[in-house]
């Protein structure tokens, strides 16, 4: 059974993170599991954590009045789930449901925010890594906005 | 009618051959797959990637990729977006359509012998790749890892759903499907195709990729493949332009120095990428 | 008489020439005056030629003036080219009738009378050769073009009166006619008005033998050569044609395209008068009941917005992109597609452009700003 620190070192998201920071971040982490279909977080709730998915998939969903729940993105093993802990108002923007059985490492966001305030260099490092993920997700979202498969009459 | 039009002595390859619709299946809200049998003669022997000009009597003709050609029967998956495609999609079993062709070049399957093959499709773009997938699977032993990455708008807009399930179950081809958005309950991926490429199993140094779909999606997918280390000349894309005659005589399908009906529709990315970058070329 | 033989003809011999062609069953076409221009039409006799007329051409301008001699071919080219006969602007490809669930094709054919062209210029012969490559030189042959072309009898004419808009010397197509003609005529005006004729094929020689003629003397040959040289020297426009393919390929974002787009009306006149433009569209026309249809091929221009139509929109929406398509295709990508230039230097596009856009100027403009980006 890998320790959280070992899991961090292996994860692409934390690649080349300084070892003292690995220990710091690992200190805020713990392993969690979700059953298929379980709710991981709800839109509007306090966002005080983020997850490093190790196994399984998670669906990010938005509730559309009279439209039901729409899955707007799926997060897979190896990805990071949740960035709302890093930016005010520290609230979840979407629902997240496990679509399969999920094993993940959950990180205490409030705890980590404290450590980033104490060590701005760590704060900068984590913010940069999350920004990278955000940029990637934004580009993919923009690509979907183009609705390339969609009704051709829209053009 | 056209008293002033002179008359051609022999229309030759501009003459449509009559084919009867023998099977008809609705794929999505606006897409149908038709199977056609020749009224006379042996029919056509198109290579994977080629297209025909499909004619609806009295309405007109459009270029459609061949998505099946077993035992002399021709299969076409058509999306109803205009008068001609609408008329073709409305053709009942027993109706007669005209067929000219096949035209164009084909997917370079022979070049991929011994290598991993990544097939990347978007929307209706899976149709021109269907016969390639069939051939690849049939000659499984001649290739390395086979992967299909397929993207669509929603789960209801995916083509050949039953065939895809069966393909996945047979286990010869790794199948990754993603949609732009889905209703709760969809257990598959929601995202974009280039993202599936990041996690796909293939050796970038030797693999061959076949791409077909909306141009923007193919460009982003090709870039994702190149980021994984694939050389541009082993990435092949099916281009689309306004094909009218299919013979290289009408000039409509020009894309810079190339005539898509004659030099394409399949191009290697190193050749076509610079042309795709010029706006309104 | 054999291929390569020469003879000297008096102007009256042209009457015999045209009569002989008609007797052989040819539909004789040649220059005639109509609506203030010299156009190509059915020639009943040599008297119908624009005898004693000349043209003055400039960007966006064309006027006819009287000459002070009786030259039969004392002008350059007008708005028509021979492509209207080889690649008709409207051609029915086939007819079909609804038949139950299907349809029956009616491929009735009617062999048109063979054509004889009288007065084909060097640039025009080169243009015909260029269209031959497009329509006959690929994997598919245009059967209608092939049959019209095969039987076409060509009586070519060396130019001695180039227009200001001509630049055939830059494109290597004139003023002397070279290529596959049946007969070529060089009109000599100084002193005795005569024609030095040369046979290009066996059937051309056969026809020449039937015409009243005399053997050429050194004075005839000298005069003929001098006329061609003088014409070449009078060329006012030119193009550096050697490297246009690469020059244009690397200047697709040159600001010159924006400049010309401000003037160009995208009217497509240039494509209509150009002797090498071949783009066509196909129309499926049906009667009101929808039971009888015809497929008709019609001329099309790349300036039409719909020309490059692709699901729900045009690939070339702006006038800028369509002008760029035309010029880069004609002088650049034609090389990639058909192994030659698409331009023969006839100057028609310059004359018949309503706003007087001059392709030689546009090319020079691109060259002088080579590498600039908008």
Image: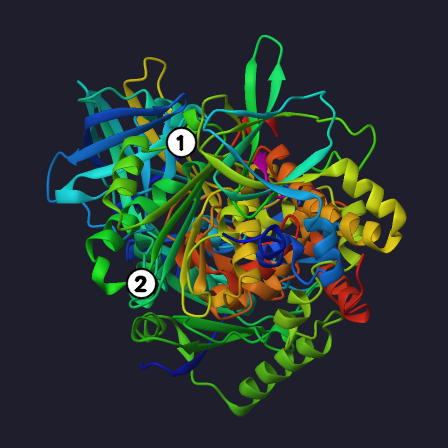
Return the mark for residue B144.
2
- Marker count (numbered): 2
User: Would residue C166 be found to the left or right of residue B110 on screen?
Assistant: right
Give the residue pinned by disc 1.
B158
Residue shown at 60% from the left, 35% from the top: A144
Q: Which residues are magenta?
A: C313-318
**Residue closer to the observer: A141 or B215:** A141
Is the residue marked by circle 2 packed among few (<14), some (14-19), or many (20+) residues within 10 Å? Answer: some
x then y, percent, for residue C332: 60, 65
Name the outermost residue toward the bottom.
C218
Quarter of the image where one finds residue C343: bottom right
- In the image, taking residue C179 as reference, residue A2 lies left or right, namely right
Q: Quadrant of the N terminus of chain B?
A: top left
Near mark 1 (Cα within 10 A), the count class, few <14, some 14-19 or many ≥20, is many
Residue located at (45% from left, 36% from top): B123
Residue B273's mark? none
Residue C30 in picture, x, y percent from top left: 49, 55
C302 or C361: which is nearer to us?
C302
Q: Quadrant of residue B65?
A: top left
Residue in the foreground of this view, choosing between A4 and C52 = A4
- The kind of secondary structure element at disc 2 is loop
Q: Relative to the observer, which residue lies in front, B26 or C42? A: B26
């Amino acid at each position: 059974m890998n320790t959280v620190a070992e899991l961090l070192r292996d994860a692409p998201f934390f690649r080349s993170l300084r070892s003292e920071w690995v220990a710091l971040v690992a200190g805020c982490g713990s392993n969690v599991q979700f059953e298929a279909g379980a709710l991981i977080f709800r839109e509007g709730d306090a966002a005080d954590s983020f997850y490093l998915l190790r196994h399984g998939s998670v669906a990010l969903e938005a509730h559309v009045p009279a439209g039901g729940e729409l899955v707007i993105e799926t997060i897979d093993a190896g990805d990071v789930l949740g960035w709302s802990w890093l930016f005010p108002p520290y609230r979840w923007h979407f629902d997240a449901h496990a679509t399969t059985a999920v094993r993940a490492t959950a990180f205490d966001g409030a705890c980590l925010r404290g450590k980033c305030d104490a060590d701005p260099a760590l704060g900068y490092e984590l913010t940069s890594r999350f920004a990278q993920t955000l940029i990637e997700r934004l580009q993919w979202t923009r690509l979907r906005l183009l609705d390339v498969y969609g009704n051709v009459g829209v053009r | 009618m056209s008293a002033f039009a002179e008359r051609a002595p022999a229309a030759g390859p501009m003459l449509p051959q009559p084919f009867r619709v023998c099977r008809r299946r609705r794929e999505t809200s606006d897409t149908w797959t038709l199977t056609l049998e020749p009224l006379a003669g042996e029919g056509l022997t198109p290579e994977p990637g080629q297209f025909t000009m499909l004619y609806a009597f009295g309405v007109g003709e459009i270029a459609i990729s061949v998505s099946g050609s077993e035992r002399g029967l021709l299969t076409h998956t058509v999306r109803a977006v205009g008068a001609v495609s609408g008329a073709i999609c409305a053709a009942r079993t027993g109706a007669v359509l005209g067929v000219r062709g096949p035209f164009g070049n084909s997917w370079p399957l022979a070049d991929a012998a011994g290598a991993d093959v990544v097939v990347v499709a978007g929307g209706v773009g899976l149709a021109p790749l269907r016969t390639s997938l069939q051939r690849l699977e049939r000659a499984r032993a001649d290739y390395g890892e086979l992967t299909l990455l397929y993207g669509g708008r929603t789960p209801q807009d995916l083509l050949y759903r039953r065939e895809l399930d069966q393909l996945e179950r047979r286990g010869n081809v790794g199948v990754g499907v993603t949609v732009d958005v889905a209703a709760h309950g969809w257990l598959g991926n929601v995202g974009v195709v280039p993202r599936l490429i990041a996690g796909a199993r293939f050796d970038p140094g030797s693999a061959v990729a076949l791409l077909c779909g909306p141009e923007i999606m193919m460009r982003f997918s090709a870039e994702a493949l190149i980021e994984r280390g694939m050389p541009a000349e082993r990435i092949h894309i099916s281009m689309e332009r306004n094909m009218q005659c299919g013979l290289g005589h009408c000039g409509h399908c020009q894309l810079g120095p190339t005539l898509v009906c004659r030099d394409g529709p399949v191009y290697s990315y190193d050749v076509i990428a610079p042309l795709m970058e010029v706006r309104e070329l | 008489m054999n291929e390569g033989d020469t003879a000297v003809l008096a102007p009256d011999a042209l009457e015999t020439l045209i009569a002989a062609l008609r007797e052989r069953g040819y539909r004789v076409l040649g220059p005639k005056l109509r609506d203030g221009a010299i156009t190509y039409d059915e020639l009943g006799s040599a008297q119908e030629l624009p005898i004693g007329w000349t043209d003055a051409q400039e960007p966006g301008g064309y006027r006819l003036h009287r000459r002070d001699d009786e030259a039969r071919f004392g002008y350059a080219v007008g708005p028509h080219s021979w492509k209207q006969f080889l690649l008709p602007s409207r051609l029915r490809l086939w007819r079909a009738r609804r038949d139950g669930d299907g349809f029956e094709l009616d491929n009735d054919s009617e062999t048109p009378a063979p054509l004889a062209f009288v007065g084909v210029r060097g640039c025009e012969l080169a243009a015909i050769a260029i269209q031959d490559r497009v329509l006959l030189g690929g994997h598919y042959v245009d059967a209608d073009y092939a049959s019209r072309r095969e039987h076409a009898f060509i009586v070519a004419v060396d130019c001695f009166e180039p227009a200001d808009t001509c630049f055939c010397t830059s494109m290597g197509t004139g003023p002397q006619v070279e290529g596959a003609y049946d007969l070529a005529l060089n009109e000599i005006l100084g002193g005795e008005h005569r024609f030095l004729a040369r046979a290009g094929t066996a059937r051309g020689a056969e026809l020449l033998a039937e015409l009243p003629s005399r053997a050429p003397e050194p004075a005839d040959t000298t005069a003929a050569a001098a006329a061609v040289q003088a014409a070449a020297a009078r060329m006012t426009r030119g193009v550096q044609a050697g490297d246009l393919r690469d020059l244009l390929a690397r200047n697709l974002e040159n600001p010159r395209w924006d400049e010309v787009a401000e003037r160009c009306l995208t009217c497509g006149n240039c494509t209509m008068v150009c002797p090498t433009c071949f783009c066509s569209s196909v129309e499926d026309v049906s009667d009101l009941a929808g039971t009888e249809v015809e497929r008709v091929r019609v001329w099309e221009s790349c300036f039409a917005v719909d020309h490059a139509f692709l699901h729900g929109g045009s690939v070339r929406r702006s006038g800028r992109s369509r002008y760029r398509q035309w010029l880069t295709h004609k002088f650049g990508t034609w090389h990639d597609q058909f192994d030659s230039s698409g331009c023969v230097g006839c100057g028609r596009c310059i004359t018949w452009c309503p706003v007087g856009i001059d392709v030689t100027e546009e090319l020079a403009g691109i060259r002088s700003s080579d590498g600039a980006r908008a």
